[in-house]
Amino acid sequence: MNRDINQLKKDNFKVPEDYFENISDKIIDRWKESDKTEENTTRQQSPGKVIKMNYSRRYWITGLVAAAIALLVYWNLPGKNSDRFDPTSLNNEEIMAYLNQNSDQIDLELLSNEVADNFEPLNFIPSDLNAIDTDALYEDLPLEDIIN
Amino acid sequence: MEKKNWTDQELIAMMQSEDKREHGFRCLLVMYQERVYMVIRRIVLDHSDADDVFQNTMVKIFNNINRFEMKSSLYTWMYKIATNEAISFLRTQKKILTNDGSMPEHIAGQILEADPYFDGDVVQKELWKAVASLPEKQREVFRLKYFEEMKYSEMSKLLQLTEGALKASYFHAVKKIEDYIKKINI
């Protein structure tokens, strides 16, 4: 059977007698109660506002501070810089002799990592390339595009 | 308390002042309690659940009144909180909503059957079952248009949807409900 749903519209939902007369006080009481709880929580949290740090984080920070102090002290020791190893003081014969004696102990992976870490990629660009737009170097362009 | 038509500004001023706050809340209740309760009841269907959700909603409204920035009408703001509370109650506490936010017809039927404060005949019960089984957005549009008789322009502001989309949604909802009632042949 076809029914027009507009004819079915009726207020089917009832409430207990005096529900709306009494509910206001109930709600106001609940609000006061929740307000009090919220106030107490805020009051308990407010003095000093101590924020507890978890232990692992505390150890990390302590460790980092200690390491920073140790490095500062180390680099500023009197005469420290003069003791530093100067690779240019070695001549080629000394280097070849060292490599011949220790070639079996050289860790190739470590060596290649060292080279990669210390390699300066722009060093091979000749100094007379003034015509190059230097801004282009900051873009990810192939070298051929920059030079041509 | 005598019912009076306070403006949103008057109510907000009372509720946000330290010494008139409680009076302001009482005025707000007098003005809007039945309307907000019905929004919730039409979603959860059962009076006892509606009562719980309604009280929680009003307490939340009171506790957050300072956050109301008058970007919409007070009722719109309360409507959104009430709808949200009711749907989240059905979803998380009752766990009776499906993925699209609809309530299975047989569950709606059981709820209405058990509620002593539902006063409808067989056809009206079926109407409510059909309404409950609509997807969430369609059901909301239907409720607002059919029961609250809200204008599309007003609804558009409330739900942030175009009037065309709302009309299409309402049309689909009516069609589904009529088909449902036709199918059960009562």
Image (tube, rainbow, N blue to C red):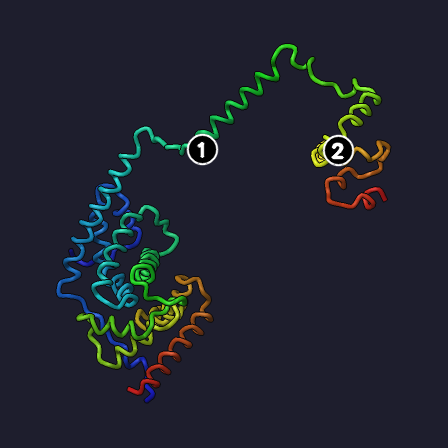
Residue B138 point in image, percent of width and height: 39, 70
Left or right, A121 with reference to B98: right
- Give the residue furthest to the left: A17
Q: Position of residue A120 (x, y in %)?
A: 75, 33
Residue at 48% over, 30% down: A60
| Disc 2 crowd, CA 10 A, few/some/many (<14, 14-19, 20+) | few
Residue B80, by quadrant, is bottom left
The disc, 1 or 2, on the residue closer to the chain's N-terminal end is: 1
In the displayed structure image, the side of residue A34 where residue B67 appears, left or right: right
Image: A120 above or below A12: above
Which residue was labeled with disc 2?
A120
| Residue at the spot 33% in from the left edge and 28% down from the top edge | A48
Residue holding disc 1: A57
Q: Secondary structure at mark 2?
A: loop
**Residue B40 position (above or below residue B28):** below
Question: What percent of the width, then of the height, locates residue A29?
Answer: 18, 49
Q: Chain of mark 1?
A: A
Is residue A40 something that shows in the picture? yes
Q: Are marks 1 and 2 on the same chain?
A: yes
Q: Is residue A92 above or below residue B11?
A: above
Q: Residue at x 22, y 48 (%)?
A: A31
- Report whether A72 appears left or right of B121: right
Give me the chain letter of mark 2. Answer: A
Disc number for residue A46: none
x then y, percent, for residue A85: 71, 18
Quarter of the picture containing the N terminus of chain B is: bottom left
The type of residue carrying mark 1 is Arg
